[in-house]
Image (tube, rainbow, N blue to C red):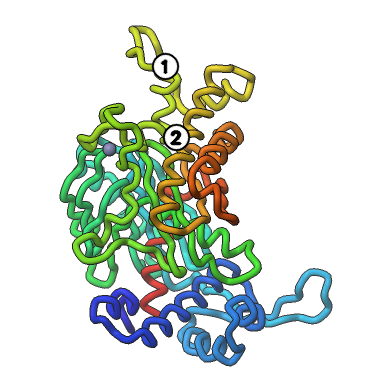
Amino acid sequence: MNNGLLYQSELLGASRVQQSTSRKGNQLLRLIRAAQPITRTEIAERLTIDKSTVTENVKPLLSQGILREESLAAEGQKRRSRVLSFTDDKIYFIGVNLGVRHSQVGFTTLRGEITDESEFETPKTASYALRLARERIDGLIRKHPDRALGVIGVSVPGMPDARREKLIFAPNLNWRDVDIASAFNVGKNTRVVVENDSTAAAMYEARLKIKDSEDGLLTNFILVRSGTGIGVGLVIGSEVYRGSGSGRGIAGEFGHMTIVAGGKPCVCGNRGCWEKYASAASAASLYLGDRPPSRGDSVPRFVEIVSKAEVGDVRSRRTLEKIGDYLGIGIANVIMGIGIPRVIISGRLVYGWKFIEGPLNTAIRRSIIGKIDGWSVEAGEPVGSAIGGALEVAVEEYLTTL
Ligand SMILES: [Zn+2]
């Protein structure tokens, strides 16, 4: 068994050959998981590798009972073909999404369905939040004595440490130095992996898109998650990018880049941060304008603004259009810095997509990115990527150990 081959080989500065071998292996397992049940021929075609390489890779996993192969008649075809899929009776995974407003704990297997999801309001203190999540984790473990818990994946609205065991800082929760791995330690055979929520959402979106795409890879894209704040997940060369050296874990903190000099104060201590203008949560203050809400003024929720816009309310539409403009300005900046022109938006903001999309594209076209061909911004999942992302972190970690 190898504990995170890619991660280790990066640290040890191992040869490129070794890295690319493990990368191919990871991609193959990801494709099987995303597109299961799938034939060996289809895997070979989508990854442009030999069928013999596929066979070589899946053989040990078949004999270990991690994968299974069965005959299945394809729709409208007489011939039955042999298809591969993951087994789900031996191992399971727990995901914990610690959100700014709500947190979820969920369960999944290698087959991919999310079940047993439960939600609670995120309390103010980290210690209480971890206790509530831990109770639910213990409950799931008691419920499944027949299977082994593989990995606990945790997504957080902030920066994890380089070892992905702690949360260094979550600005919107004002939590610092939270030792999550210790709080969720259920035994030495279960690893706890902490990941930034946007990076986790990027992993989740990648799997959904791989399922529907023609080839087996979603090589390069930027995920912008806009909800209470804004976070950015980066997938470069089919792997998530977290930064390097002492910056490992902080890549993608674009929500706090300044887009309005001297603008609105932000929880991070700066002024004019992107997330004060283009997050779903920023809609309320854009809607109310610069005047402070007077007594009795209710602060509208994002989905309420969207519903009003849908029935023609001009102020609500303008609010969403403004968000689209600010979002586009920031996205153009991110594309310029990273050089990856494919962007997927996820989070609550997606609910207002039809009003946001136009002004967003206009803002990008205004920038230097508008001069290049082939950039795209598409809407992803509004909510599923939260718990889905946390579970994806857990399963990804497990796949790298196979
Ligand atoms: Zn900020």
Q: Which residue is mark 2?
A: 326
Whichever of callouts 2 and 1 sits on the residue coming sooner in the sequence is 1
Circle 2 — which element?
A: helix
How many marks can you see? 2
> Residue at (53%, 29%) from the top-left corner?
321
Q: Is residue 323 left or right of residue 374?
A: left
Point out the image quarter for the N terminus: bottom left
Q: Mark 1: few, some, or many residues within 10 Å (few <14, many ≥20)?
A: some
Q: Secondary structure at mark 1?
A: helix
Q: Residue 5 lies in what quarter of the image?
A: bottom left
The CB of the residue at mark 2 lies under 8 Å from ligand 1 = no
Disc number for residue 263: none
Which residue is located at x 45 percent, y 52 percent? 335
Residue that label 1 marks = 288
Question: Type of residue at label 2?
Answer: Tyr
In the rendered view, tell whether residue 120 sits above or below residue 44.
Answer: above
- Residue 204, image x, y percentages: 47, 57
How far apart marks 2 and 1 lie (CA) works out to 17 Å
The C terminus - image quarter: bottom left
Q: Nearer the viewer, mark 2 or mark 1?
A: 2
